[in-house]
Amino acid sequence: MSYDKFIDLTSTAVPLPIENVDTDQIIPARFLKATERVGFGDNLFRDWRYDENNNIKESFVLNNKSYSGKILIAGKNFGSGSSREHAAWAIYDYGFRCVISSFFADIFRNNCLNVGVLPVQISPIFLEKIFQAVHEKPQTNINVNLKKQKVSIVDIELSENFEINEYKKNNMLNGFDDIDYLLEMKDSIIEFSKNSPI
């Protein structure tokens, strides 16, 4: 199994109401030398979290102790720019299991789904309601139910459904990446090949 199964998640959230966040802002290029998925969380939003002298920027939301949780609430067009999969690795390694936005760059969305981060695309109106709820009360719980394809603001009982590719949904529910999916079908593939003409 490549990552933990994602079925139903209830968590507080970290609000990042900035539009057009690209992958270089998520994980700067100078940190892309590693080839394993570990350690990237330390440098998530590195240039926004720290100044040039490596001092913490108190104003940045990830440095605000009022906010925490496994859900990142992001502005429109999150994950644009280069196709680096390290951006998804950094988000997962930091501890986020879900990113909610009103729009994702396609390559970033797929990279997230391949490593166990669920990208949930909702309407701009509902996104604003989530931002408002979390800003007013940082302890607000957000529920993301993958089976029902529904995201809810638990405290005020507001919800909205979201779309997801059925194949990717099944992989997330089982904790599979593409290779795991094929390995799960190994016996069927072998049986098929035995009964197929060469």
Image: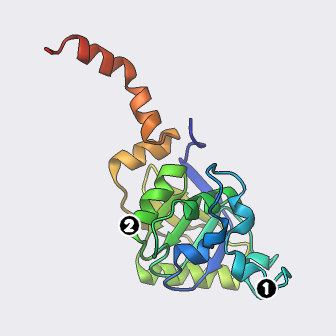
**Residue picked out by circle 1:** 51
User: Disc 1 residue type?
Assistant: Asp
**Dot 1: within a 10 Å radius of its alpha carbon, few (fewer than 14), some, or many (20 or more) residues?**
few
Q: Residue at x 37, y 57 (%)?
A: 164
Q: Residue at x 63, y 51 (%)?
A: 37
Residue 140 in sight in this render: yes
The part of the image, by quadrant, that contains residue 56 is: bottom right
Question: Residue 77 placed where, x, y %?
Answer: 44, 79
Closest to the observer: 3 or 143?
3
Instruction: Find the distance from the CA under tag 1 to the CA under tag 2.
Output: 31 Å
SS for dot 2:
helix
Earlier sequence position, callout 1 versus callout 2:
1
Residue 178 as seen in the image, left or right of residue 194: right
In this view, the residue farthest toward the left is 197
User: Disc 2 residue type?
Assistant: Asp
Closest to the observer: 141 or 172?
172
Name the quadrant of the C terminus: top left
Q: Residue at x 32, y 16 (%)?
A: 190
Question: Residue 144 placed where, x, y %?
Answer: 54, 59
Question: Residue 33 placed where, x, y %?
Answer: 64, 59
Residue 111 as seen in the image, left or right of residue 25: left
**Residue picked out by circle 2:** 106
The part of the image, by quadrant, that contains residue 32 is: bottom right
Closest to the observer: 53 or 43?
53
Residue 145 image label: none
Residue 155 in sight in this render: no
Instruction: Name the mark nearer the viewer: 1 or 2.
Output: 1
Task: Give the vertical position of 176 relative to 157 (above or below).
Answer: above
